[in-house]
Amino acid sequence: MASVIIIEDEQRIRELAARALAENGHSVSTSANAMDGLQAVVGSSPDLVILDLGLPDLDGMELLKMIRAVSDVPVIVATARGEEPDIVLSLDAGADDHLVKPFSVEQLEARVRAVLRRAQTAPRGTPVTIGGLVIDGAAREATVDGEQLELSPKEFDLLRYLAEHVGEVVSKRQLLAEVWRQPYGGSDKTVDVHLSWLRKKLGESAAETRYLQTVRGVGVKMVEPA
């Protein structure tokens, strides 16, 4: 069904996760440290990576950044770090989901299915154009009035999602579920901060909007600029 690389130094967790995913038809390989894991990702172009952050040779967050520098492969961070700042940090660094240990095999399998489903349906075709804003999902680039925007991975994902729903009011809960991969809840402040950064890069503010309109008590809406 999919090729999966598990980068995890705890042998018991690594073997349990690999066995469960293999029984579900996935092709699974494993690495016990960061450098072997990075080499496997680069060399085999997997469909999904499951990444522990507490690795013996390099912090998993640094490995995540290295993976993101060379690949858009979906990454599920599976770690004992469960505080909200840790979750926000991993998602902002490019993780597609954050799973906190201890977790059941069933929960891992459900997260894998969800992330793979989103990856398979993610648009990669014609760039989206709204006014002077152009968003190229395949190249992961965006320009406004001909100037390229310097966006973090999560800022780009947020901008693209809003552009794909232009004219629709999107709630913060929806953004947390679809952009931050937190269907079971998260902090609205994360969305607020990223919207503020996006507005600044788009040359607007909450008081003087061009593309992003706040609908008080409901959510945010991308519109064609006047």
Image (cartoon, rainbow, N blue to C red):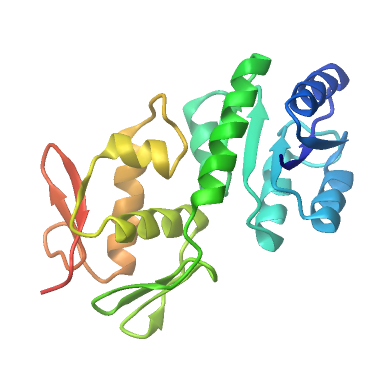
Q: Nearer the viewer, residue 23 or 98?
A: 23
Q: Does the image show residue 149? A: yes
**In the figure, residue 24 lies in which quadrant?**
top right
Q: Left or right? Give the position of 181 relative to 119.
A: left
Q: Does the image show residue 81? A: no
Q: Left or right? Give the position of 171 relative to 102.
A: left
6 to 158, vertically: above or below: above
127 to 78, vertically: above or below: below
Q: Nearer the viewer, residue 122 or 24?
A: 24
Measured as percent of width and height from the top left, residue 8 is found at: 80, 30
Count of labels in the image: 0
Q: Which quarter of the rendered picture does the N terminus lie within?
A: top right
Tell me which residue sits at (29%, 64%) in the image.
200
Q: Which of 109 and 89 is in front in this view?
A: 109
Q: Left or right? Give the position of 102 relative to 141.
A: right
Tell me which residue sits at (65%, 56%) in the image.
68
Q: Which quarter of the rendered picture does the C terminus lie within?
A: bottom left
Measured as percent of width and height from the top left, residue 90 is found at: 57, 40
Measured as percent of width and height from the top left, residue 191 is found at: 33, 43
Tell me which residue sits at (44%, 60%) in the image.
156
**In the figure, residue 106 lies in which quadrant?**
top right
Tell me which residue sits at (31%, 61%) in the image.
163
